[in-house]
Image (cartoon, grey):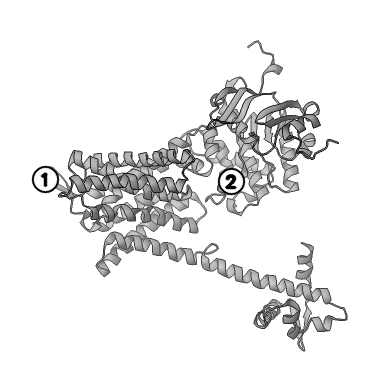
Amino acid sequence: MSQLIAIVVAVACALPGVFLVLRRMTLMSDAISHAILPGIVLAFFLTESLSSPLLILAAAGTGVLTVVLVELLQRTKLVKEDAAMGLTFPALFSIGVILISRFAGNVHLDMDAVLLGELAYAHLNRLEMFGIDLGPVSLYVMGTILVLNLVFILLFYKELKLATFDASLAASLGFAPALIHYGLMTLVSITTVGAFDAVGSILVVALIAGPPATAYLITDSLARMLILSAILGSLNAVSGYWLAHLFDVSIAGAIATTTLLMFGITFLVVPRRGVIAIARRRHRQKLEFAQTMLVIHLLNHEGLPEAEQESQVSHLQEHLRWEPPFAAQIVRYALENRCVSQKNGQLALTERGRGIAREALVH
Amino acid sequence: MTNEINEIKAIEVTDLTVAYQEKPVLWDIDLDVPPGVLLAIVGPNGAGKTTLIKAILGLVRPAAGRVLIYDKPYPLQRRIVGYVPQRGSVDWDFPTNVLDVVMMGRYGSLGWFRRPGKAERELAMNALEKVGMQAYADRQISQLSGGQQQRVFLARALVQDATVYLMDEPFQGVDATTERAIVALLQELRAKGKTVVVVHHALQTVTDYFDWVMLLNIRRIASGPVEEMFTPDNLRQTYGGRVAFMKN
C-alpha cells in the first residue's frame, strides 16, 4: 500500500514540476515547501487533525503568499530573486517552527515528521466510513491532488505552454499569464503539502525537480516530457521503495536517492546531450580539426621544392608544434579516413584529403 | 462616425507617459499611424522603443495617456493585432518544435480551452512556407540559427492574420538573405493594406525599407513620411549629435 502511495505522490509532484523546471522556478517549490509550515500549524491548531482538508487549504494559501512576498521583494529591485527567496521562506518557516515548539510540544506534529515525513506509516491512518475501512487517508488525499493536477494541466495545457514559452505573447493575446502563474503556484503549494505527510518538506523538492529535469534531457516535446516525468517518477518511487526494504532505511530517503541516481545516469548516458556523448563529440571534433590542419598544411606545400621536407611524418611535430603522440594519433586518424597516404615516411594527400583542405580554405 | 475612411487611424497614441518607478521612459508621446504604412521606430538605446510597443499592446501600464487601435482600446482589438517580440525574449531550449511555435499565433483566435487542430496546422504550414521554413516544421527550436528563429517568429505573427503588426527588432542578428526576405514580407503586408510598425536599429536602411518613420528618444522628436521627417536635423535631435550618419 505504501508503494501505491509513493507512486501517486511521485506522479503528482512530477507533473507541475515540469512547468517549474521550464520556468526556472524549481527553487520556488523548495521555498514553498518550507514556507507552508506556519499555514499547516495554524490550521492544525484550529482543527487538531493532521488530515483535515483545511490544512491543505491553509498551506496552499501560505504557499501562494510566499510567491507573492518573493515577487514583491524582487520588484523593489533592492533584492534579487534568489536573495528574496532566501529571506522569505526562512521567515515563514521559522514562524512555523516557533509555533510548534511553543504550543504543540506534546502533539503528533513533531519536527521529524515535518522535515522528513514517513511513508512507512502513511497507510496506518485509515479512512473509515460507516465502520468500513476504505484505505489510507493519504492515498485519498494524494489521489485527489493528482487528479487536480491532471485536470488543470489537461484543461490549460495550451495556455500553460504559451505562458511558459512566451509570457508577453500570452499577455498580448489576452491569456493572463499572471493568472496562470498563480494557478500553477497554488497547485504546487497544494501538491507540496499533500506530499508533506509522505516525504517531508525537504525531499518533496527532489520529486518535483528530479523527474522533469531527467525527462528534459531525453525528449524535445512538452507533451512527452510530461508523460515521461510521470513514468520516471513512478519508476523512482517503486525502486526507492524496494531499496528501502532491502537496506531497511527511510522510504522517502531511498526514493529521493533513486530519483537523483536516475537523473545522474541519464545526465551521463543520454544520447546527444549527455556528458559522455558531449565528450565523445568534442574528442571527434578535435581530431577532425587537427586532420584539417594537417591536410591544409600538406596542400600548402604540395608540389613545392620544400614539400619533401614538410610532409615528413617525423617533421610534423616540429612544423605544426604538435606533441609526438598527438601527431602520431592524427596521422593514424587521417590514414584511417584515407585523407592521406604514407610512403617511406612521407605523407601525400589523397583526392579526398585535397578536397577537405580546399573546402576548409574556402569557408 | 462622421470620420471619413481615410481619417481613421490604425494606431492612435495620445499623451502617453510610461514610467518605471517615477523614472519616465516615455514622456507624453503622441503618435498617429494611418492604415497601410510601414513605420520604423528609430532612436538610441534606452529611447523607449520597446516600451512604446509594449505600451501599445497593454503589456506595460502607462502612467498617463491612452492608446487606440482603429478607434478602440487594445483589449477589444487583440484579434487584429499581431506581435513579434524580440527574439531573445524567449527560451529557445523550450521542448517544442517549429510548427508548434507557429501554431501559438492561432491561440488568440482559439481562446481559452480549445486546442489547435488540423486547420491551425494548415495555417501554420502556409505561414512557414511564406517565410521559407516549411522544411523545418518538425525541427526542434533549439537547433535554429538566429535568422531562422526570426522567421519562425514572423510566421507565428502571420498566422494571426492581423491588421496591425508590431515587431520588436525583427532584423536583430539576422543574415543579409533573411533581412531581404523579411523586408519583402513586410512590404507585401503593407501592399495588402496592413499596418506594420517595426522597431529598427539600422538608420542606413530606413529610407529603403520604410515609408513612415518615428524618431523617438524618451519623447517623440518627429513622426511622419520618411521623406519629410527623416532629416539630418531631426536625427541630430534624436541622437544628440552622436550620429555619424549622412543622408545621401
- Residue at the (62%, 71%) spot, across then down: A284
Location of the C terminus of chain B (image quadrant): top right
Residue B99's mark?
2
**Residue A223 appearing in the image:** yes
Residue A275: give x, y in percent of width and height.
52, 66
Residue projecting furthest to the right: A305
Give the image location of residue A18, x and y in percent. Answer: 43, 50
Label 2: chain letter = B
Mark 1: which amino acid?
Gly
Disc 2 secondary structure class? helix
Q: Quadrant of residue B171?
A: top right
The quarter of the picture where residue A301 lies is: bottom right
Residue type (three-letter) at the residue carrying disc 2? Leu
Query: Which residue was labeled with disc 1?
Result: A131
Neighbours of disc 2 within 10 Å: few (<14), some (14-19), many (20+):
many
Residue depicted at 64% across the width and 37% down the height:
B46
The residue positioned farthest toward the top in the image shown: B2
- Image quadrant occupied by the N terminus of chain B: top right
